[in-house]
Structures are given as structure tokens and as C-alpha cells.
Image (cartoon, helix red, strand yellow):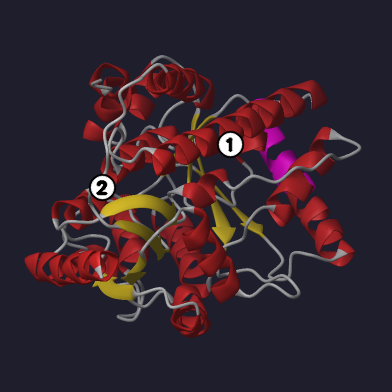
Amino acid sequence: MDLSPWLTVFQNVTADYYEYARNAAAQGRKVAGYFCSYVPQELLYGAGYLPIRILGRVGATSRADELLQPFSCSFARSVLDTALEREWPFLSLTLFSHTCDTMQNVADLWRAHTGDSKTIIVSIPTRVDTEAAAQYYSDELQRVRSLLEEDSGPIAEDAIQQAFDLYQGHRATMNELYRLHAEHPGLLTGTQLMEINLAGQLMDRAEHLAAVKALIAAFQAVSDLPDEKMPRVFVWGSMCRHTAFIELIEQAGCRVVGDDLCVGSRSYAPAHVEGATPMESVVRYYLARAHCPAFHRDMHHPGTALVEAAQRYKAQGVIFLMTNFCDPTAFDYVPITQALEKADIPSLTLSVEQHQEPPEQLRTRVEAFAEMLQGSAVS
């Protein structure tokens, strides 16, 4: 069965990342841009904003290069360059999370050099598993709520609860899609799943949720599921702002069956939490969810977590998409590779630039990796 009729809605959104937001703004809806999955989108949604993820673009970053240090990552340079080029006239608000020093620098420069819309920076405690962290983050989100209310008016508790329930339902549905995809990757490719991921961060979550549910229903109705002959790989990294890297991996002979990317599964990381108030539920979700390398939890080993994920997805190997100069992922890379080696899981590391198309030399390396995995499976 061809799932393309159910994929069209997502592909239309990713064909022009910000057309959906531009149309929403033209129809009178306030649009809030965010840069990280740790932004409390439920507060934005509850305040009436359309939250959309700012992903930058492919292209030169000459203006941003004048302001940022040369060791700043390509994602930071790309998003700042788009702001300096005034590519965001439809934004009413931009909201940053202080996840690393580079993005804090971008936030300060964005605020100083654009002035087109309100800029809010929310700080998240780097240690996320203590009551002190919960109290700090609760105070921080109350501050953010107050800043939003200056423009939107009071945000009702019921509105926050409804937004939280919507986002929790959306996260659960996306994880169900991931499960189905991993079981039958020959029907829905990793590239198509990445398109669905990206669309989810560029459109209204309620509309995206309905489209994903329709796709899952179509998926489950298929009786003659195709076999998948390509080696199964799990992808780990930070940003992956467009589908080209996943597409290259699959064109080179591997099937991406799962990922730990901040625009992929990490954006839909589940956490079963219940707070005494809607705000407390939001606070506890963001501290309890599967965290990215910028944050820490006692007794959490990133290598153990990745080994378990690769085994859960029955991946034969792991491919790292390492954005150059991304320090948090670089710090986790060593213990992760050691854990994979100990578990006898092969890996391949690809250095990538988020504002450039993947170079063809990466294809050659993935092809060799695919051949090695195929050979291992045969033997």
C-alpha cells in the first residue's frame, strides 16, 4: 500500500518551512518562534500563539559571521543570519532556551540587532533531577508567563491544561508512529518520518496530531507489509534541520529506523508526569523528559541510554550526525562510543554543517558502512 496520500500534508509544509506560519500571521494569529525543544510550548499555545521552530536555512552566513566567533556552530550562525536579513517579519515573539553558551550569545545578538519582535530567554537548570531544579524552573516559567501576559492578557489555567493535554497526546501519538515505523521501515522510510517530524514543529499541533492519527490508521490497515532488506541504523546527534542527511543515509543503503535528534524523537520525548496545577505539570514534564546532552541527571550514562535505544529499535549500527562545534554532543560522544564498542554495536561518525547540503563524500562513507553491516548480517 502506498501511504503517499497521507504524507502529502506534511510534505506541503516542509516544502517551504515558514509558509504555514506566514499564512497564520496573515490571518491574524500571533506567531512565536522558538529554537529548542526545551521551550515551554504549552505556555505559548495557551497564550494563543502558534509556536513554530526556527530552523535556519541552507546558504551563506556572512552577516552572522561578522558577529559570532568562528567556533560557533553552523545552526547558530544560520539562524542569526536569517534574523539579520530580516526574514522573520511575521514573528510576534521569539523565545530562546539557554541550552548552551553559543545560543545564549545568539539570543543576545538577536535582541540587540533585530528589534522586530519581543525576545524572551528562559533558563533551564543544567541539573534537572532535584527539587531545587524544579523550584528554580517553576519560578522561571512563572516569569515567562508574566512576560507573555503583557501582550496576550491573562493566560487561564484551563488554557494551559488544554495545551498540556494536547502536547502530551501529540507526543504519545508520535511515539506510536515511531514504533510502527521501526517494526515496518519498508512501508514508511526514515526520510518520510523526518518530514513528519519537521512538519510537526512548523504547524499547529492539533492539526498535525489529526494528520498523524490519519496516517497511523492507514498504516495499521495495511495487510501486506513489505520486507526491509537494508541494514537498520539508529541516528544520534543534535540538529538535523532538513531531511537531506537522512535521505543520503538511506540512498547509500541504510534504513534509519530510529533517532535521538533534537528535531526528531527528542522533540517528542515522553514523560508521565502529573502536577498539582497545570503549570507544575509543564515544569515537571520538561525536567523529567529524556534530556539532551546540554542537561544532566544523576546516574544517567549517555552511552547506556544509546545502547538501549539501538537495541530497542533492533538497529545493526549507529550513525552519528555531529554538528561541528556542538560542545554538548562532543562531551557525550566519548562515553557513548565507548559504550557502543563494549556492546559490539558498529558506529559511523559524520561531521555535518547545518547550513550546507551534505557533501557527496559522506555518501561514500555510508555506502561502505552499509556494506560492512550487510556483511556482518550474512556471516
Residue 30 position, x and y percent, is 50, 26
Determine whether the residue tagged by mark 1 lies in a helix, strand or loop. Answer: helix
Q: Does the magenta stretch include residue 146?
A: yes
Q: In this view, does 232 lie above or below 45?
A: below
Residue 360 position, x and y percent, is 8, 65
Which is more toward the observer, 161 or 157? 161
Q: Is residue 299 above or below residue 281?
A: below
Q: In this view, does 137 lie to the left or right of 335?
A: right
- Quarter of the picture holding the N terminus: top left
Q: Mark 2 sits on what residue?
A: 243
Residue 237 position, x and y percent, is 41, 65
How crowded is the residue under tag 1: few (<14 C-alpha within 10 Å), some, or many (20+)? many
Report how far apart the C-alphas of labels 1 and 2 lie in the structure: 20 Å
Q: Mark 1 sits on what residue?
A: 171
Identified at 41% across, 14% down, the residue is 27
Contact between marks 1 and 2 (CB within 8 A): the answer is no
Name the N-terminal-most of marks 1 and 2: 1
Q: Is residue 4 above or below residue 346?
A: above
> Overall secondary structure of the magenta stretch?
helix
Q: Is residue 66 left or right of residue 31?
A: left
Identified at 31% across, 28% down, the residue is 225
Residue 90 position, x and y percent, is 38, 32
> Could you tell me if residue 16 is visible in this image?
no
Three-letter residue code for mark 2: Thr
Which is more toward the observer, 227 or 89? 227
Identified at 40% across, 21% down, the residue is 215
Three-letter residue code for mark 1: Arg
Q: Is residue 46 magenta?
A: no
- Quarter of the picture holding the C terminus: bottom left
Q: Is residue 8 left or right of residue 320?
A: left
Q: What stretch is highlighted in magenta?
A: 142-152
How crowded is the residue under tag 2: few (<14 C-alpha within 10 Å), some, or many (20+)? some
